[in-house]
């Protein structure tokens, strides 16, 4: 196997290039999703609280996550990968493993294929792409990390150990802060030192499974192949409030907004699901999860919302709430699911309305159409003069055609 790991950089607007930019939740409880390399020099990292990022880099430009733009770019990126090989294993929206062994007769050696991918990313998507090429997935990913922010690292089979052994112990998958500290106490600071350490010493410090796992990786052994089939288990969305709330009207609106997002994501990905679940995190950080499985799979936001609201009201929560989430599980492809709806059923009307809304959103953006109950009076006044704005009442379903 010739494994690639390709990581695509965030596309930035020309006026932001070279500046510290942080993308993520911009509220007081927001979390960093991504940061430019200029911001990372100040210590800003993904999954860091936004407040901490502001303290580290007060001059950074903070931007909210643009979900539709990310989804569109991710789809285009994966299409380029799949033009090279059908053996693509996405790791996230902008990262994937590729097995290019079968593409070499047509496209050339792995290094040439990597250059082709990077060139197409720039020409077609204006995105930089860091690529690691190696005989195994693990080493290919390490190569991609070394190639960032915009480069190519090739690690041929005979040079794998020369590449691996000088690296620090936390370069190995499965070595977090605690494991790294344990290894350092044993005098093991590099991958090479782990490779040459007695396996019994590693077992005593880390346990059987971790010891064997790290020992194998330290010698460059990673038997896993690229798995193009990645089963979707659930699709969801969450919302963390800037301040804890107890207002049922605000919570109802939040659940409606989340159900709206989940329904759109289900339809875009081609899935329906039978189980609707909610997540409620209270002010004291206790988390409550509830779910309900229905007889018929759905991708209709209206149905998802009604179940979510019923689950929430059944909780009888009296405390202030920090976070709410909505998720649909038990997914099956839409094409294999028969809804068996008659023309007069309200669900068909909602499905057709939401599908029509998807088309409008794809052309004019998410702000162009949505549930009226999510808008304030000032928002409603603005829609009167907006040529592409439409509001959909929450209470009455559309009439089926």
Image (spheres, grey):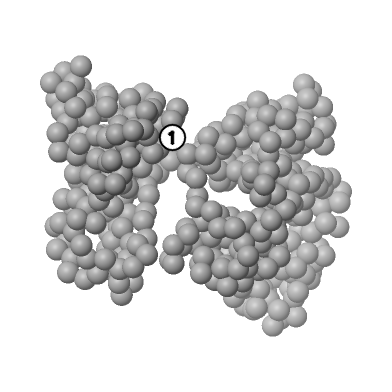
In the image shown, does 145 or 344 lie closer to the viewer? 344
Name the side, left or right, on which 39 lies relative to 51: right
Residue plotted at (15% across, 56% down)? 313
11 relative to 40, above or below: above
SS for dot 1: loop
Q: Where is residue 322 in the image (x, y as percent from the top left)?
A: 32, 66
Q: Is residue 70 above or below residue 200?
A: above
Q: Which of 119 and 199 is in front in this view?
A: 119
| Figure label count | 1
Image point (33%, 68%), residue name: 243
Q: In which quarter of the image is residue 187?
A: bottom right
Residue at 14 percent of width and 63 percent of height: 316
- Percent across and percent down for residue 1 are 72, 38
Q: Is residue 361 above or below residue 290?
A: above
Q: Nearer the viewer, residue 165 or 30?
A: 30
As drawn, 126 above or below 313: above
Task: Name the residue that disc number 1 marks.
Answer: 365
**Residue 53: x, y in percent?**
57, 67
**In the image, residue 189 lies at what x, y percent?**
75, 74
């Amino acid at each position: 196997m010739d494994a690639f790991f390709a990581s695509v950089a965030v596309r930035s607007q020309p006026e932001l290039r070279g500046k510290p930019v942080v993308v993520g939740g911009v509220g007081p409880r927001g979390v960093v999703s991504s940061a430019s390399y200029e911001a990372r020099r100040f210590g800003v990292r993904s999954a860091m609280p936004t407040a901490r990022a502001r303290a580290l880099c007060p001059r950074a430009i903070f931007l909210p996550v643009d979900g539709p733009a990310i989804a569109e770019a991710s789809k285009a990126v994966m299409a380029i990968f799949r033009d090279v090989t059908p053996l693509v294993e996405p790791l996230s929206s902008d990262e994937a493993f590729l097995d290019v062994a079968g593409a070499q007769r047509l496209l050339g050696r792995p290094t040439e294929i990597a250059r082709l991918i990077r060139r197409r990313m720039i020409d077609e998507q204006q995105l930089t792409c860091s690529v690691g090429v190696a005989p195994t997935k693990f080493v290919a990913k390490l190569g991609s990390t070394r190639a960032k922010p915009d480069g190519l690292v090739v690690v041929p089979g005979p040079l794998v150990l020369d590449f691996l052994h000088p690296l620090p112990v936390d370069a190995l998958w499965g070595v977090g802060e605690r494991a790294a500290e344990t290894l350092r106490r044993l005098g093991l600071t590099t991958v090479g030192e782990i490779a040459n350490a007695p396996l019994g010493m590693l077992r005593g410090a880390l346990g059987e499974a971790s010891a064997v796992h790290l020992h194998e990786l330290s010698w460059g052994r990673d038997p896993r192949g690229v798995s193009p089939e990645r089963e979707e288990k659930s699709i969801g969305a969450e919302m963390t409030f800037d301040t804890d709330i107890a207002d049922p009207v605000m919570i109802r609106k939040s659940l409606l907004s989340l159900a709206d997002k989940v329904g759109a994501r289900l339809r875009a990905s081609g899935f329906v699901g039978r189980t609707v679940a909610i997540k409620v995190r209270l002010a004291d950080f206790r988390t409550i999860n509830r779910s309900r499985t229905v007889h018929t799979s759905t991708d209709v936001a209206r149905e998802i919302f009604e179940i979510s609201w019923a689950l929430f009201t059944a909780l009888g929560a009296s405390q202030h709430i920090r976070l709410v989430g909505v998720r649909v599980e038990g997914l099956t492809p839409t094409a294999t699911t028969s809804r068996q709806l008659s023309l007069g059923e309200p669900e068909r009307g909602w499905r057709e309305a939401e599908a029509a809304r998807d088309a409008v959103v794809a052309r004019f953006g998410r702000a162009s159409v949505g549930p009226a109950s999510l808008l304030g009076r000032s928002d409603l006044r603005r829609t009167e003069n907006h040529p592409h704005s439409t509001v959909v009442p929450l209470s009455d379903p559309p009439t089926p055609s």
